[in-house]
Image (cartoon, helix red, strand yellow):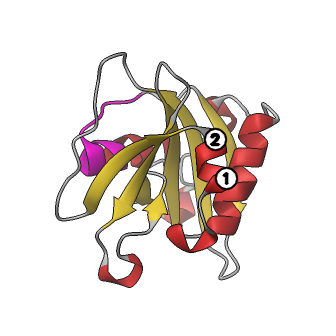
Amino acid sequence: MFASSVVIRNENDEILLVREADPRVYGKLNLPGGHAEEGESPVDTACREVHEEVGLDIQPSGLLGIYRHAGGGLNYVFLARADEGTEPVPAPEDILSAEWYSVSEILALPENQFFRYRKLRAILGDLQANRHFPCDIIRDIPPESWEN
């Protein structure tokens, strides 16, 4: 399986980060997102996870990249904008808080504040380089007759 995350920016170009409630990474900053459900596309996963975690309805505008963790897991990272004046509402069972940060503020924080710091640094580097792709670069292919 895979996970999808979203770099959500507000009208000030700040990025939304969440503090995780999961005991394994309690209090660590992360992008909103999570793992796919059976049969779900990467874009659908991103939209569902953002809605579940912070109550925002987003429409991804592009794919920033696909990042592979040392353990082999894939994380699709999308770009989106929050509607002006819309504030995230953290789901208390998953998220302790939702906070807006500038890129420079994120980079100034200590590594131990983050879940997967190296991945976030790579994502921010791609964001600053304006490296992204259209969402339709990801194509769903119907199953072959023998796959059913």
Q: Label for residue 103?
A: 2
Q: Is residue 18 visible?
A: yes
In the shown orientation, is residue 6 left or right of residue 127?
A: left
In the shown orientation, is residue 141 left or right of residue 20?
A: right
Residue 52 included in the magenta stretch of the image: yes
Q: Is residue 109 above or below residue 61?
A: below
Q: Quadrant of residue 130?
A: top right
Asked if labels 1 and 2 touch by Cβ distance under 8 angstroms, the answer is: yes
Q: Is residue 138 visible?
A: no
Q: Which residue matches tag 1?
A: 107
Q: Which residues are magenta?
A: 49-58
Task: Considering the whole magenta stretch, tell me its main secondary structure.
Answer: helix
Residue 118 included in the magenta stretch of the image: no
**Residue that sits furthest to the right in the current view:** 129
Category of crowding for the residue at label 2, using alpha-carbon neighbours closer than 10 angstroms: few (below 14), some (14–19), many (at least 20): some
Q: Secondary structure at mark 1?
A: helix
Q: Is residue 30 above or below residue 79?
A: below
List x then y, in percent, for residue 97.
29, 54
List x then y, in percent, for residue 146.
55, 64
Q: Is residue 114 above or below residue 18?
A: below
